[in-house]
Amino acid sequence: GTLVFAHALVREAALAELGLATGHALRLRAAGALEATAGDSAAAEIAAQYAAAGDRPRAGSWWERAGVMASRASMWAEACMRCSLALR
């Protein structure tokens, strides 16, 4: 089924209850679903999901995409932040 949370803290509490492995699996599924449906338009959210799941290579790639998109929109501070996350 689909899980929808009204607040990020509720989501985090629910994931904590499920356990680390299940939480990582759910985040990987969420990232995959976002990739399939939204692609680059959700690059920062995809990166955040991969990062939270512990998948650094994929997170880095998506943070870089998110940084490029932010720079194209002249969102310089956001671009710098996202690109710095790509380097971690």
Image (cartoon, grey):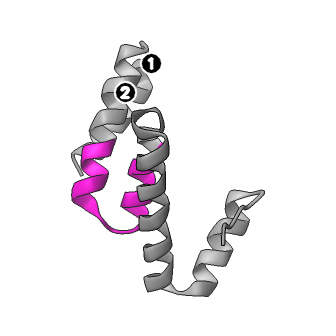
Please report contact status of discs 2 and 1: CB closer than 8 Å, yes or no.
yes
- Identify the magenta region: 45-62
**Is 35 located above or below residue 13 in the figure?**
above
* Gap between marks 2 and 1 measured at Cα: 6 Å
Which amino acid is tagged 1?
Met
Say which residue appears at 59% left-offset and 76% top-offset.
15
Say which residue appears at 27% left-offset and 37% top-offset.
64
Q: Position of residue 68 (x, y in %)?
A: 31, 26
| Residue 35 covered by magenta stretch | no
**Is 74 located above or below residue 7 in the figure?**
above
Q: Position of residue 48 (x, y in %)?
A: 44, 52
Residue where numbered disc 2 is placed: 79
Say which residue appears at 36% left-offset and 15% top-offset.
72
Say which residue appears at 71% left-offset and 61% top-offset.
4
Residue where numbered disc 1 is placed: 75
Residue at the outermost right position: 6
